[in-house]
Image: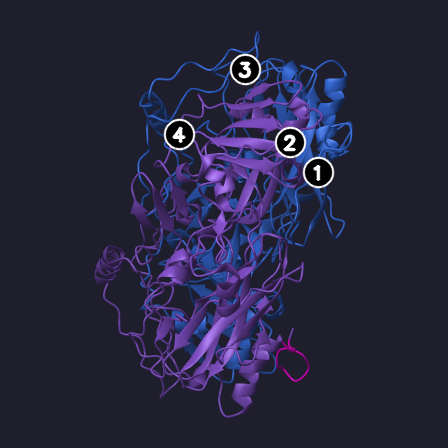
Chain colours: A blue, B purple
Amino acid sequence: MPDQDGSPPPLSRRALLGGAAAAAGGAVLGAWTQPPNAPNAATAQPNAKAGAVSEAARAAQPSEPAPNAGPPGPPQAPPDPTKVPGPPSEALGPRSPFETPALAPTGVTTGAANTPLQALAGTITPSDLHFQRHHAGVAIIDPARWELLVHGLVDRPTMFTLADLKRLPSVTRTCFVECSGNGRAAYRTPKREMTPQDVDGMSSNSEWTGVPASVLLREVGVQRGASWVLAEGGDASMLTRSVPMAKLLDDAIVAYAQNGEALRAANGYPVRLLLPGFEGNMCIKWLRRLEVKTVPSMTRNETAKYTDPLPNGTSRQFSFEMDAKSIITSPAYPERLAGPGWWQITGLAWSGRGRITRVEVSTDGGRSWAAAELQGPVLPKAYTRFSHMWRWDGRATRLMSRAVDETGYTQPTLAEFRRVRGPGTDYHYNHIRAWDVTADGHVFYGVS
Amino acid sequence: MPDQDGSPPPLSRRALLGGAAAAAGGAVLGAWTQPPNAPNAATAQPNAKAGAVSEAARAAQPSEPAPNAGPPGPPQAPPDPTKVPGPPSEALGPRSPFETPALAPTGVTTGAANTPLQALAGTITPSDLHFQRHHAGVAIIDPARWELLVHGLVDRPTMFTLADLKRLPSVTRTCFVECSGNGRAAYRTPKREMTPQDVDGMSSNSEWTGVPASVLLREVGVQRGASWVLAEGGDASMLTRSVPMAKLLDDAIVAYAQNGEALRAANGYPVRLLLPGFEGNMCIKWLRRLEVKTVPSMTRNETAKYTDPLPNGTSRQFSFEMDAKSIITSPAYPERLAGPGWWQITGLAWSGRGRITRVEVSTDGGRSWAAAELQGPVLPKAYTRFSHMWRWDGRATRLMSRAVDETGYTQPTLAEFRRVRGPGTDYHYNHIRAWDVTADGHVFYGVS
């Protein structure tokens, strides 16, 4: 309720910024100048075809008066909508025809499809926009024929059906999955015209549900000396990785659901392995076999691939955990700021080692840093949305973010990263990303 | 890591149930008998057309050997999938052709579409499966023409564009939205053949993102005496409700995103009001106007409708907060349990007044109750998934759940609810739901 002088009670620090501006001569919005056709971050589409759909939808709208250009005179009530009932409900609630977010698929047999991070809000990645990376196309598997074999150094080798898994105790948790090669193009061949989707779109965040791997291992009875488990996928590439027993007993999930529903086909339907915080390629999709062993299997996918080449010619192997990382998703290319004033800087931070404890934002190219606000709940090994109100003075500058996790690890600068990992490194690109704002409000990926 | 005798370290209480069964003569799974064609809760469809799609997809699968019928002999590795690369990624990751969850739309101008709760896992409702309820169809609104007028008892009447809103500080939170009439059919005209979708499908849970209503009110400057706000929708029904100023200043959100993306059209695109814990009809979709006032407006939608008739002929008005409630989503109609043994009972609980602190499950028709496990994080005014391992002895019985929230409120029995609210009550049906299990494993809604 309003307090005794009729004004609302004190609000958060963020809202007080608006209050301060109002006290200094007008409300935040009063000082804004927003051209009627300013690009909109959430509807701007990298995909020309999708943009065309939006334009068509817009043209099909019933004619309405143009929006008010602004003062003078108090704003009027919007036009009467009561004469045009809408269409009825459908069996699935489609997106608005004005919204056409899309993955950016590449390749056929071996391919990737990046998530449009700049089109998203909050922390959940819609399942149909979850990034994809595969080595032999998207396996289409009949759940009635699918089985999971758990064998090797166990007392009771067992074949589990999907119905078996759903009968066992379930667990649900939210966490990110990130390709170990995420950020490669931005490091190796950076371009000013890269979107967040181009830079870091091989990362997504979902609520996952399944059976704790520890429950399955309890069911089959792990024997003395068991230290590693070979996980094998059921697509035509039969991707294999060795996973430490400790991880499986800690927080691994044999997952059959994502964001409340069955896994999408490209993300491992009917069942994938989920290793919270570990690199994506270890979270084996279309999981069909777990073999308990005493040693890692040293398969092609963990020797020829998924090792980090270092400057001295050796390789860093078994970089399981994804390092702490962040990226500003707005403002970012291809957005254009309409003019000086207050803008919200927002983005995502995550760490494979636990919770994000702090995200700092620099609006002056790294000379000074301020703590951003973290939107709660801050969950371990999950996307954390940060936001920071920034009063732009209209001069060219560089925006940056850096994440700190609960182990104290701080996201490195590009220079630090390059010195330690070398220009030819091939995975785990977690250096600080930068966005350059020009004096006319354009925003470009910072290439150095 | 395994401990010194080679077996995994102690697991949760739930997994120990499996261990106990193993010690008593075999692992949990070893004791299971699962007919090859047993209905699967997650793929069973109330929609005959959807089911037909699944069958077609199954028939189109490449031929594979039938799954093992079981012992004798150790299980063998699954068949070789490496000769059949899958299709490439698409711009949107579709569901598996074997999964066809669907809303159950009714009506045209005035209609509802219930969420298939029994087909979901975890807590998030996929946006295209979020329940819908509308009075004049689904408004299709051009975001470039949309504006929100905030006026009335304020210093600076203001018209906000969508770009304005996205420039202001954002907030993200997960919470449920529930129609105040949810559960009406199950109370008024119960049938044994009702699914969770039929019983309570006008409730869903999402991660929502938008601007705190308090920020907007700070921007426009609320004047002395302002205690209520009339919120008006932009569809052809122009639904209006009066909202206490205290709620808007507390945790209300002017929301433009749901589960990471723009709102779906049927859920209020481009902007809806979100009042966490309040009845769904107050969370005005297609929001176009907020008018600050000293008194509630007493519009048709808060006098003729959305008041609870009581047994004594009077009505209970302004039942804003949704009472604590729970429903078991599995086992539930039309599932059939394949036989005695361990089964997971799982479902959802929520309260408009805060966190769920306890869910109790009865497997003997209410004679005894046991605390279910709550899957974390337990968030206020949000779905909480509960689960409970149940060893069925094969006799007919009744399953029930009851929720307790942090205010100490306990979900009432059907008899208690009926005594206080009367048989003709029209909203806020939160009595305990029951499921009857027959000796041959069928599960039916408990009608009394």
Q: Amino acid at mark 4?
A: Phe
Q: Chain of mark 3?
A: A
Name the secondary structure under disc 1.
Answer: strand
Disc 4: which residue: A98
Give the farthest residue toward the bottom.
B25
* Nearer-N-terminus badge (3/4): 3
Name the secondary structure under disc 2.
Answer: loop
Magenta stretch, residue numbers: B2-11
Q: Chain of mark 4?
A: A
Q: Say which of marks 3 and 2 sits in front.
A: 3
Q: Say which of marks 1 and 3 sits in front.
A: 3
Disc 2: which residue: B169
Q: Quadrant of residue A325?
A: top right
Q: CA distance from mark 1 to mark 2?
A: 10 Å
Residue B244 x/y as whole percent: 62, 37
Q: Chain of mark 1?
A: A
Q: CA distance from mark 1 to mark 3?
A: 33 Å
User: Which quadrant of the figure contains the C terminus of chain A?
Assistant: top right
Disc 1: which residue: A373
Tag 1 and tag 2, C-beta contact below 8 Å: yes
Q: Amino acid at mark 1?
A: Glu
Dot label at residue A75: 3
Q: Chain of mark 2?
A: B
Which residue occupies the foreground of this view, B8 or A385? A385
Which residue occupies the foreground of this view, B35 or B205? B205
